[in-house]
Image (cartoon, coloured by chain):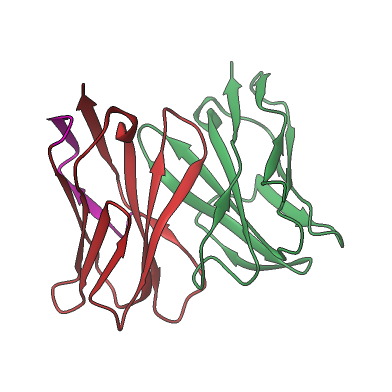
Chain colours: A green, B red
Amino acid sequence: KAGVTQTPRYLIKTRGQQVTLSCSPISGHRSVSWYQQTPGQGLQFLFEYFSETQRNKGNFPGRFSGRQFSNSRSEMNVSTLELGDSALYLCASSFGGPAEETQYFGPGTRLLVL
Amino acid sequence: SQQGEEDPQALSIQEGENATMNCSYKTSINNLQWYRQNSGRGLVHLILIRSNEREKHSGRLRVTLDTSKKSSSLLITASRAADTASYFCATAPYNTDKLIFGTGTRLQVFP
């Protein structure tokens, strides 16, 4: 079956703009997690959604938000972009949750903020 | 903050040699997972080991877990150039539903 897909793959924005990233999980998976990866901070957990509800949230400001639709597809939004938001954003899906079982990762969206 | 710290940060070996990476963590866990990442792409799951397991194998990979020392190791035997990648441990702390990644080890395997 098809893997996790993320769109767009690359994005360039300027400071102050907002951005929406999309993640389509593997069919049947109800949990979607988002991570930010930067050279300085490594892989940081953003949030996790399960059946349209946010179950867990990492230590990120309120500018970072997300949602999950009834078909399990998820979006994350970053408002008022800052230079430090430049990163690779990864989503991962699973049947249960990130702490229970294997996570299947998408290829990521590389965001550059100028 | 990072739950896991990996050691070494970087490792260079020749094809055919074994590579060992270590991961230490801070709190009690439900399980520990190892992932591989090639050159800024998505992560690929390698092995999940639960807190009540001590060792697990998958092909050329062997993972050990010592919960008393809060540490794990990943051994790749008979390494290949295609094993060149970054390797991350990720822990699922007890009573949370989060997966927290370590800092990673960059492995370079020379042909």
Is residue B77 shown above or below B100?
A: above
Closer to the camera, A70 or B44? Answer: B44
Q: Is residue B19 above or below residue A110?
A: below
Q: Quadrant of residue A81?
A: top right
Residue B18: image quadrant is top left
Occupied quadrant, residue A95: bottom right
Q: In this rendering, would A91 be left or right of A53?
A: left
Horizontal side, residue A76 vs residue B60: left or right? right
Q: Tell me how many marks there are.
A: 0
Could you tell me residue B2's position as x and y percent?
Answer: 33, 54
Q: Residue at x 21, y 21 (%)?
A: B111
Q: Percent from the top left, x then y, of residue A34?
A: 59, 50
Q: Is residue A112 visible?
A: yes
B12 in the magenta segment: yes
Residue A108 lies, in percent from the top left, at: 59, 36
- Residue B58 image position (x, y, % from top left): 34, 59
Is residue B30 or residue A16 the one in the foreground? B30
Residue B75, above or below B82: below
Range of residues picked out in magenta: B1-16
